[in-house]
Amino acid sequence: MNGFLILDKPEGLTSAQCVYKLRSKLGIKKIGHCGTLDPLATGLLPVCIGEATKFSNFASDLAKVYEVGIKFGIETDTGDITGNIISKADFLGFKEDFPQLLTNLEGIQNQTPPMFSAIKINGNPLYYWARKGVYLYREPRKVDIQKIELIDKSDNTAILKVSCSKGTYIRSLVEKLGRNLKSMATVISLRRLEVGEMHINNNSCSFEDSHQSLINKILPCDALLSYMEKVKIKSEDAKKVRNGLSIDYNALLENKGLVRIYTEKELFLGIGEVSNNNKLQPKRLLSMN
């Protein structure tokens, strides 16, 4: 059993707990997830099964779309409503320039990861140190906030839709927005709507699905890789690639770099890389056993 599931993650579970539950329901040990969601968060969690685990890192690199609920006037130690309130500030309401403030948050920028995150320092995730009261220096990371849309707002809350690159921390973005409003802010809800070209839709699964329903919803191993160019190779070249050998590939490609490799019969072999000298080198291949 190989491929991807689009899990509609419920609130209250860690991403790892979701994996454990699916292992139990499907009776398969080789399952992982692509891109962590906080326990508070719901929505699209790509889950890789069997041979698809070889491509989890490539899937994790995809852009994301979130819907985030925000409460203004407070900050918490975790950056969301599950934490302890550490600061309060008056929120004087939304001014006419609020849409422009959202636009000002868009673009490529450096973002400091929150202490309550899964990034490892000195062998342990940051949240491990935060729970011990140890706050460490975090190297700012480059992220791209592609678009922020206002969905709704009320007295001291708002709902935004955020399109962003991998590695973006919505909690950090929300806190920055609060400070730009000369107040404070924290996340009260978070739902991931998209990962790359995957959406929450009828193909999504939940823990309410039966064993057979889950199996029926498994997508192919190349389901999250459509952003890579596709190359087809002849059967004799396929044999070389499966043995780890590079081959000449002279067909015109829009971009060099990572590609999806298929046989002439549309059988997906795995991921390779086309170099500037038109050599196709296999990188991660499906087992043919």
Image: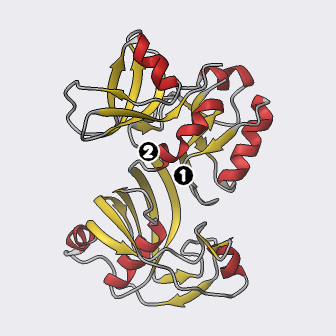
Q: Where is residue 287 in the image (x, y as percent from the top left)?
A: 61, 25
Reply above or below: 128 against 61.
Answer: below
Taking depth in this image into account, of 33 and 66 the one nearest to the observer is 33
Residue 7 visible here? no
Q: Which amino acid does label 2 sit on?
A: Val
From the image, tell me which residue sits under label 1: 35
Figure colour scheme: secondary structure
Residue at 39% x, 86% y: name it.
183
Q: Report if residue 105 is visible in the image.
A: yes
Q: What element carries label 2?
A: strand
Label 2, on which residue?
Answer: 195
Q: In this view, does 45 lie above or below 89?
A: above
Q: Are marks 1 and 2 in contact (CB under 8 Å)?
A: yes
> Residue shown at 58%/55% (left/top)?
36
Against 269, residue 284 (above or below) is below
Horizontal side of 258 relative to 114 (left or right) equals left
Q: Nearer the viewer, residue 103 or 120?
A: 120
> Is 267 on the left-hand or right-hand side of 97?
right
On the image, which quarter does residue 90 sit in?
A: bottom left
Dot 2: few (<14), some (14–19), or many (≥20) neighbours within 10 Å? many
Rendered image quadrant of residue 158:
bottom left
Name the quarter where the N terminus is drawn.
Answer: top right
Crowd around label 1: few <14 · some 14–19 · many ≥20 (10 Å): many
Horizontal side, residue 283 vs residue 205: left or right:
left
Residue at image position (45%, 18%) is 238
Q: Name the amino acid, label 1.
A: Gly
Mark 1 → mark 2, Cα distance in angstroms:
9 Å
Q: In which quarter of the image is the C terminus?
A: top right
